[in-house]
Image: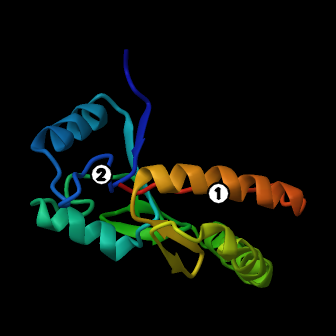
Amino acid sequence: MTLKMVAVDVDGTISDPEGRIPPCTFRAFERVTSSGGYVAIASGRDEESIAEVLRRNGYRLGEKGYPHALAAADRIFYLREGRYVPDEEWNERAERWWWETQALAEELVDGVLPMLEGYEYERKERGFWFHNLDDALHAQRMLTDYLRSRKVTSLRVERNG
């Protein structure tokens, strides 16, 4: 079977908790690209943070012609002639959407804070960072129910690590 595209996250997918990426990962990427396929990284990290993780593992972003695309912190970049070029239309639309929905997001986050008493988490600009998976999964169920009760029809969950 020939893969047309492989898209991976960084944290907890291609890297371990210490940020190490096994060399076999890069060999697998090379097999995909040598067979005509594409490699993409989709991460909540920004472009520079992705590049730093790869650098610490001996790989410069794009040096062997991959990843062909980055979905980095809600922005999209494509590898063109050795450098990453932003998808301006998508990135502008995503930025506009974020600013248009930020007040509602903050209101919803404030509304769920009392439900999170006893959980280990940090409040982030766009949500919460839980310190353990069990808390995250339990809170996800509570938050989903709360948001549905508020008629929120779209929920994005990121699990890093």
Q: Tell me which residue sits at (78%, 85%) in the image.
A: 103
- Badge 2 crowding class, 10 Å Cα cut-off, few under 14, some 14 to 19, many 20 or more, is many
The answer to whether residue 147 is above or below residue 108 is above
Q: Quadrant of residue 47?
A: bottom left
Q: Quadrant of residue 29?
A: top left
Q: Tell me which residue sits at (41%, 68%) in the image.
A: 45
- Badge 1 crowding class, 10 Å Cα cut-off, few under 14, some 14 to 19, many 20 or more, is few
In primary-sequence order, the first of circles 2 and 1 is 2
Q: Is residue 96 visible?
A: no
Q: Tell me which residue sits at (60%, 57%) in the image.
A: 139
Question: For this view, does 24 lie left or right of residue 131?
Answer: left
Between tags 2 and 1, which lies in front? 1
Mark 1 lies on residue: 156
Q: Quadrant of residue 109?
A: bottom right
Q: Tell me which residue sits at (12%, 59%) in the image.
A: 57
Query: Which corner quadrant holds the N terminus?
Result: top left
Outermost top residue: 1
- Distance CA(mark 2)–CA(mark 1): 27 Å
Q: Is residue 149 visible?
A: yes
Is 154 in front, or is 72?
Answer: 154
Mark 2 lies on residue: 66
Helix, strand or loop under label 1 = loop
Helix, strand or loop under label 2 = loop
Question: For this view, does 89 lie left or right of residue 117?
Answer: right
Q: Amino acid at mark 1?
A: Arg
Percent across and percent down for residue 65 are: 27, 52
Question: For this view, does 27 lie left or right of residue 61?
Answer: left
The answer to whether residue 7 is above or below residue 2 is below
**Figure label count:** 2
Query: Which corner quadrant holds the C terminus?
Result: bottom left
Is 151 in front, or is 6?
Answer: 151
Q: Amino acid at mark 2?
A: Tyr
